Image (cartoon, rainbow, N blue to C red):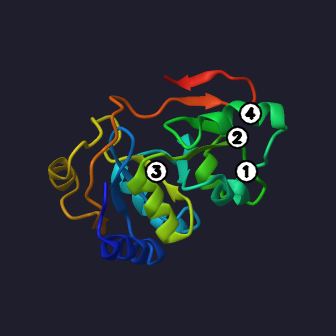
Amino acid sequence: MATHPWHLRQAARHFWLGGLIAYPTEAVYGLGCNPLDWAAVQRLLQLKQRSIDKGLILIAADFDQLRPFVIEPAQEIMAPVFSSWPGASTWLLPAAAEAPKWLTGKHCAIAVRVTAHPLAAALCRACNSPLISTSANIHGQHPAKSTLVLYKQFNRQIDFILNGKRGALKQPTPIKDAMNGICIRA
């Protein structure tokens, strides 16, 4: 799943300028932005017509990118998390006090994933940061699985589209609570 380095640099440039980026993930196209840029997050939520109360997922190339956003529980709690990463498993972990409230919504936990999708991971590395990763769709509609659907649904409201193959999953990644093992989304 090779992409030209120029595309990754352009995506990272948009990321740091507060832009919205669409990119392939394990199942669908994701919409992302800088998780610390409130204006970019507001724009993303407005575009999706999504409530801030729901919280947002962060994806990363490695766990070190997520450390500033989470409180790492005990090793026995983290064992299943680490054994599933990199991979298509999203976990709820306790949010660090410094994590912006727009990432957690009305919750005390934050949803995080160390992605195994090569292009999504490369994008995180190019940005030197985790990314917000929410499905590329207007709330309640089917997530985009192609760039054609992205163009139709968002009509140039996305600043950069990183084109590439999606992963093999049929549905967005499952979400589990690391503290109790309960599946939030199958």
Query: Do callouts 2 and 4 mark residues in contact (Cβ within 8 Å)?
Result: no
- Asked if residue 4 can be seen in this view, the reply is yes
Three-letter residue code for mark 1: Val
Q: How far is mark 1 from mark 4, CA to CA?
A: 16 Å
Q: How far is mark 3 from mark 4, CA to CA?
A: 23 Å
Q: Position of residue 111 (x, y in %)?
A: 60, 42
Q: How far is mark 2 from mark 4, CA to CA?
A: 13 Å
Q: How far is mark 2 from mark 3, CA to CA?
A: 16 Å
Dot 1 or dot 4: first in sequence order is 1
Q: Nearer the viewer, mark 1 or mark 4?
A: 4
Three-letter residue code for mark 2: Leu
Q: Nearer the viewer, mark 3 or mark 4?
A: 4
On screen, residue 109 above or below 70: above
Q: How far is mark 2 from mark 1, CA to CA?
A: 6 Å
Three-letter residue code for mark 4: Ala
Q: Which of the numbered marks, if any, corresponds to residue 9?
A: none
Q: Nearer the viewer, mark 2 or mark 4?
A: 4
Query: Do callouts 2 and 1 mark residues in contact (Cβ within 8 Å)?
Result: yes
Camera-side residue of 101 and 124: 124
Q: Residue furthest right?
A: 74
Q: Secondary structure at mark 1?
A: loop
Q: Which of the numbered marks, if any, corresponds to residue 93?
A: 2
Task: Name the residue carrying label 3.
Answer: 133
Dot 2 or dot 3: first in sequence order is 2
Task: Name the residue carrying label 1.
Answer: 70
Residue that appears at 75% across and 36% down = 78
Q: Position of residue 122 (x, y in %)?
A: 45, 61
| Left or right relative to 29: residue 51 | right
Camera-side residue of 45 and 13: 13
Dot 2 or dot 4: first in sequence order is 4
Task: Name the residue carrying label 4.
Answer: 79
